[in-house]
Image (tube, helix red, strand yellow):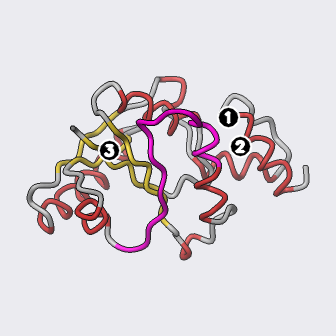
Amino acid sequence: MAKALYPGTFDPVTLGHIDLIERALHLFDEVTVAIATSESKTPVFTLEERIDHIQTIFEGNKRIKVIGFTGLVVDLAKEEESKILIRGLRAVSDFEYEFQMANMNRAMSPDLESVFLTPKAKFSFLSSTLVREIASMGGEISSFVDPIIEEALKKRFKV
């Protein structure tokens, strides 16, 4: 059974992330969405909230597992018995960083492969950072996130 690990902060999960998860399901039997604690980034949502958001969005899909983690992705991949990391590339600017990370991960864990997926063109500009910024100012975000996330952001920012 081919199991892939899709790590990230997902603060918040966007339609671009959802698109990549769905694309990964065409390639792998199981996708584990691994949500980093990311305390250094001071996330808007707690780890538990981010886990709950993604579990709710994919409720009933037995091929998607959602977990939280702290530490190195290579260690988590070993724990989860996954030899595949999913990474998203929105633009050329993402490539250099992701290429460097893939090589570093491979140096630490030679059997770990990084698979790069691109989102639909309409999501290629989308980032959690931009969504948070727009939401914090009361902007329209319904075309960028699932309705569950839209509601959560409105409550969080009281807009």
Residue at the (31%, 55%) spot, across then down: 97
Q: Secondary structure at mark 3?
A: strand
Q: Secondary structure at mark 1?
A: loop
Category of crowding for the residue at label 1, using alpha-carbon neighbours closer than 10 angstroms: few (below 14), some (14–19), many (at least 20): some
- Quarter occupied by residue 109: bottom left
Q: Nearer the viewer, residue 59 or 47?
A: 59
Q: Nearer the viewer, residue 42 or 133?
A: 42
**Mark on residue 71?**
none
**Mark on residue 86?**
3
Category of crowding for the residue at label 3, using alpha-carbon neighbours closer than 10 angstroms: few (below 14), some (14–19), many (at least 20): many
How far is mark 2 from mark 1, CA to CA? 5 Å
Sequence order check: which comes first, mark 2 or mark 3? 3
**Residue 28: x percent and y percent?**
28, 33
Q: Identify the amino acid type marked 3.
A: Ile
**Mark on residue 149?**
2
Which quarter shows the N terminus?
top left
Q: Which residues are magenta?
A: 53-71
Q: Nearer the viewer, residue 80 or 91?
A: 80
Residue at the (40%, 38%) spot, across then down: 91
Q: Secondary structure at mark 2?
A: helix
Horizontally, is 14 left or right of 105 in the view?
Answer: right
**Residue 50: x percent and y percent?**
61, 55
Q: Identify the amino acid type marked 1.
A: Asp
Answer whether residue 63 is magenta in the image.
yes
Residue named by callout 1: 146
In the image, is residue 68 above or below residue 149? below
Residue at the (66%, 36%) spot, across then down: 145
